[in-house]
Image (cartoon, rainbow, N blue to C red):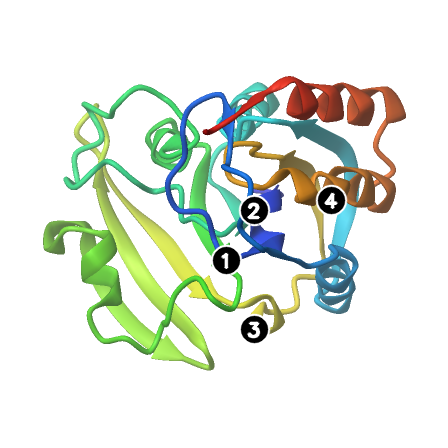
Amino acid sequence: MVLYLDIDLDYFVSPIIRESVTNHRPAAGETFEIREPAGLFTILKQKEVFFGHKRYLFTNHMQSHLRWWLNGKPDNTVIHIDAHSDLYGHSSPSLTNLKMLGCQNYLWHSIREGLISDIYWVFPDDAVDISQPNLLHTMFAPSQLGKTFLQDNILHAELLCLLPDGRKKTVSYRLLKAESLPVFRETAEIITVATSPEFIPRQADGLIDSIGRLLGMDETVVQNVLKRHADMKTVR
């Protein structure tokens, strides 16, 4: 079991864009607040999340699943820093018939394939209210939930899953803000960063440079991602 750090740039954009058009940038005109990633990285340092050497930058978040699969290690912990849960489109404990792999459900696929068993969903301040009594029931069917409780500003839940081979699997799921993360004292073996151009406005593309510098990303990779963002059409 190892630790993965999984970041989506939409975490830094407010208000959150909740609906998108495939292969199109959000419509122009709305005013957004863009938060610099340095604040988050300061918190990660305080929580002693150390950065390993495997660092990946890409546009579609489902690529995280590929990187974890290629790493070949089972039952890992992921710190999922994102404006969205990415546990969408599935309402049954059985993981046999998941919808096609995409950015909206790659965490379900990762659970089914034994890649992860422990998830910390770190959400931005305006994403969800974990004190809302029925929050988890707006996200999951009752049959998917085991024990749930709120403690120390962290909403804990058991996700009850049934694997294709008939084995039961319980995933530890926690919803929290970055400052509520525990101290890990552990190196994130893989760091994945999704730029999600369908979910961030063009004025937020500077985040790609910022996070590239913070993580020491290869400049060629950063420029290739920036070009893909620039070339994508805008919703009209």
Q: Sequence-wise, which precedes: disc 1 or disc 4?
A: 1
In the image, taking residue 15 as reference, residue 219 lies left or right, namely: right
Q: Amino acid at mark 4?
A: Leu
Q: Nearer the viewer, residue 216 or 126?
A: 126
* Spot occupied by residue 21 in the image (x, y as percentages of width and height): 40, 28
Q: On the image, numbered disc 1 is attached to which residue?
A: 15
Q: Determine the secondary structure under disc 3.
A: helix
Indicate the quadrant where residue 9 lies: top right
Q: Amino acid at mark 2?
A: Asp
In the image, taking residue 17 as reference, residue 148 lies left or right, namely: left
Q: Amino acid at mark 3?
A: Ser
* Spot occupied by residue 167 in the image (x, y as percentages of width and height): 21, 34
For label 1, the crowd category at 10 Å Cα-Cα, with few meaning under 14, some 14 to 19 and many 20 or more, is some
> Disc 1 to disc 4, how far (Cα)?
16 Å
Label for residue 207?
4
> Disc 1 to disc 2, how far (Cα)?
10 Å
* Spot occupied by residue 216 in the image (x, y as percentages of width and height): 87, 38
Farthest-out residue, bottom = 152
Q: On the image, numbered disc 2 is attached to which residue?
A: 10
Indicate the quadrant where residue 155 lies: bottom left
